[in-house]
Image (cartoon, rainbow, N blue to C red):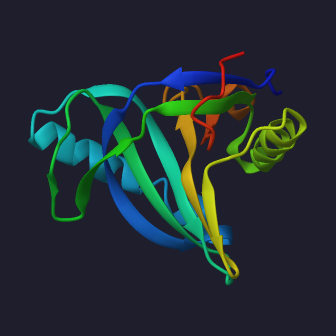
Amino acid sequence: MLSEPKTEYRAEQPYVAIRKNVPMQKIPEVLPPLIPEVRKWMLKNHITPDGPEFFLYKSIHENNVLVTEVGVLVKNPEPGEGSIEGGSFPAGYYATIIYTGDYRNMMEAHMALEAWINKMGLTEKRRISGNDTEWGARTEFYLTDPDNEPDPEKWITEIAFLLDDPATEPQ
């Protein structure tokens, strides 16, 4: 199930994450196990989450390998250490949609948000070079913890894409 897409302005938001290159088809087996690793580091360093866990898709290359970051929002910028890196989502206007259901079917939400952005005459922030695409911030925020909700049809995910035009008004 999909919500109506919308745009909204968001302030800069820091996070901690692990960066990983992963073939698109390997996302379900490679990325989710990184969340407990990030959480363990946060606990060890007494860092409190300031929002949900997420997968940030930074870029895709011609061989369908994605550069990703798996992380958690935090209140203050953190430098990270070892495999943990500090980062931040840039301030700006984001197009968002809420998807409810099993993660395996989430591609439809990405496609619906892309179609809506095009229909509204907006532009996602991205840079294309040959067969490679680098996104400004293309993210899945996991609003439901599967450990607390065993029914995948009730899992809620917010998909958010940073828009290119800083003058985009919220809707």
Rendered-image quadrant of the C terminus: top right
Residue drawn where x is 72% and y is 45% of the image: 123
Q: Position of residue 72 (x, y in %)?
A: 36, 39
Q: Is residue 119 left or right of residue 57?
A: right
In the displayed structure, 41 sits above or below 1; it is: below
Residue drawn where x is 20% and y is 31% of the image: 76
Q: Does residue 157 show up?
A: no
The front one of 121 and 62 is: 121
Q: Position of residue 163 (x, y in %)?
A: 63, 40
Rendered-image quadrant of the N terminus: top right
Residue drawn where x is 79% and y is 46% of the image: 105
Question: Seen from this angle, which residue lies furthest top?
Answer: 171
Question: Seen from this angle, which residue lies furthest front?
Answer: 167
Q: Does residue 6 show up?
A: yes
The front one of 119 and 13 is: 119
Question: Seen from this angle, which residue lies furthest left?
Answer: 45
Determine the image quadrant of residue 150. top right
Determine the image quadrant of residue 49. top left
In the displayed structure, 132 sits above or below 36; it is: below
Q: How many marks?
A: 0
Q: Is residue 43 left or right of residue 169?
A: left
Residue drawn where x is 62% and y is 57% of the image: 126
Q: Position of residue 124 (x, y in %)?
A: 68, 47
Question: Seen from this angle, which residue lies furthest right?
Answer: 119
In the displayed structure, 68 sits above or below 80; it is: below
Q: Is residue 122 left or right of residue 151?
A: right
Q: Position of residue 36 (x, y in %)?
A: 34, 47
